[in-house]
Amino acid sequence: MWPQPVTPCTCEAAGFCARHKCEKTYELVIACRLNWFAFEQWENGEGPCIDRMRDEIDRIVTEAQRYAELPACRHRGAEPIEHVECELCGSRLQQVPVYACTIFGKCTSRRYGSRTETMRTMPACIRCEKYEPPDAGQPPPASQTAVHLT
């Protein structure tokens, strides 16, 4: 049963609010009905709405995906051997590449949250104590070691 509103809120159920033109949960409708400050925020187009929150999460995920990957570890294979679905964080349902690793058998390039045991326990290059950049142990190119006398 909905509490009697103290604000001019006319919402009768959770879902799309025609007055404020956004999607509200049960808790947000209660706030709109009983809290003048919250109601005024929605009236000014600033109150929290589920659809706006989803847009913000999508924006954050898109920006996070722009960050450069760590260079491949010299122990990691060049091509993924499989993909595992990530279920948590902003990367919901993202296909995470899994690589062959000469030390651990399998690894990922960075840590991914997941409900799956496989992804929670899989080694990740970004946190690995045995990480070595691809050119580790290689002498620098001759152009970087040559001494030029003039």
Image (cartoon, rainbow, N blue to C red):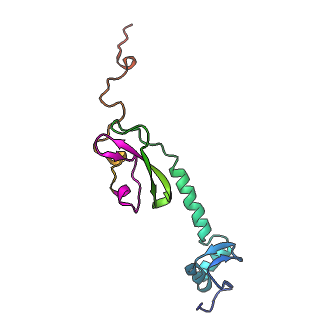
- Vertical relation: 55 (above or below) 10: above
User: Furthest-top residue in view?
Assistant: 150
Q: Position of residue 105 (x, y in %)?
A: 31, 45
Q: Position of residue 58 (x, y in %)?
A: 57, 58
Which quadrant of the view contains residue 132? top left
Q: Is residue 126 left or right of residue 40?
A: left
Magenta stretch contains residue 117: yes
Q: Is residue 11 left or right of residue 80?
A: right
- Vertical relation: 44 (above or below) 130: below
Magenta stretch contains residue 24: no
Towards the viewer: 84 or 47 = 84
Towards the viewer: 120 or 56 = 120
User: Furthest-front residue in view?
Assistant: 81
Q: How many marks?
A: 0
The range drawn in magenta is 98-120
Residue drawn 61% across and 66% down?
Answer: 52
Q: Position of residue 53 (x, y in %)?
A: 57, 66
- Vertical relation: 107 (above or below) 150: below
Residue drawn 34% across and 18% down?
Answer: 145
In which quadrant is the N terminus drawn? bottom right
In which quadrant is the C terminus drawn? top left
Towards the viewer: 111 or 121 = 121
Q: Position of residue 104 (x, y in %)?
A: 29, 45
Which quadrant of the view contains residue 119? bottom left
User: Furthest-right residue in view?
Assistant: 18
Which quadrant of the view contains residue 3? bottom right
Q: Is residue 7 left or right of residue 58?
A: right
Towards the viewer: 37 or 131 = 131
